[in-house]
Image (tube, rainbow, N blue to C red):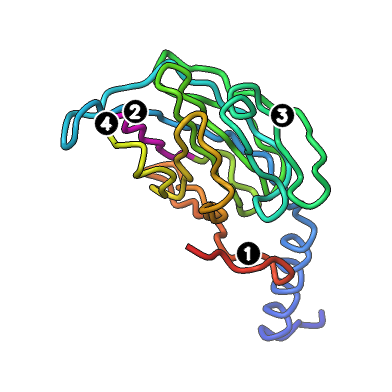
Amino acid sequence: MRRIPFIGLLAVAAAAGLTFFSCKKVTYDATFTITPTVQRVNNGVEEPRDSVVAYGFDGDTTTWKIKTFEDALNGVFTNDVSGERRSYARRADMDGGTRLTMQIASRFSVVVVCDYADSIYAWRNVQIGGNLPLLTTLVKFRPWKPAAAYPYDEIRWRMVLGRQTPDATSTDPATDATPNPGSDQTTDDTPPAAAPPFRP
């Protein structure tokens, strides 16, 4: 009986492993969970916020923007180049009055969260890595801030006061989402080569 050298067995195993991983399909389907909070006074306690709606759209903030409070409230996204307006691709569900949950099926998404009670909205770009089933993030509303402080960036959200036009001072919100706490999942926050870099 002919013996196969040990080195040969290692080569066969390595080839089989490469074939397995190369055939594994990369998907961008993920559950995106947002925990909204509100802080009523400076340095005050942050409380859960339930007077919010959230929407997602397949695209990125280099092209698609939230132009007005009404657009944020109704999930309308505007193409910054052509002026085309589109309705949201998905709407988040409120989970137990403390979290918003939506399904994302694209590597790049624009997400907006609107606090209709205090007329503040937050929007950002979300870029996810492949095969990450669960992503979580926070959004913090601070109605105590004076109007002159808006818009501002926090936790990669662009925070905008209602009835305010953000275009003149707005920059593109950043592009990563925080992995589920306690997991070893990470997100890819490196923009593709063709995309312009984020400018804070």
> Which image quarter is the N terminus in?
bottom right
The mark that comes first in sequence, 3 or 2, is 2
Q: Quadrant of residue 48?
A: top left
- Secondary structure at badge 3 equals loop
- Secondary structure at badge 4 equals loop
Q: Nearer the viewer, residue 181 or 37?
A: 37
Q: Quadrant of residue 139?
A: top left
Going by the image, does 38 lie left or right of 165?
left
Going by the image, does 169 lie left or right of 91?
left
Circle 1 sits on which residue?
A: 191
For the residues marked 3 and 4, what is the alpha-carbon distance in whole angstroms? 29 Å
Q: Are dots 4 and 2 in contact, CB under 8 Å?
A: no
Circle 4 sits on which residue?
A: 144
Name the residue: 50% across, 17% down: 94
Majority secondary structure of magenta residues: strand
Name the residue: 59% across, 29% down: 72
Name the residue: 66% across, 44% down: 65
Residue 178 coordinates in the image, percent (x, y): 45, 47
Name the residue: 70% across, 36% down: 77
Residue 104 coordinates in the image, percent (x, y): 66, 37
Q: Which residues are magenta?
A: 136-144
Which of the two discs, 3 and 4, sits closer to the camera? 4
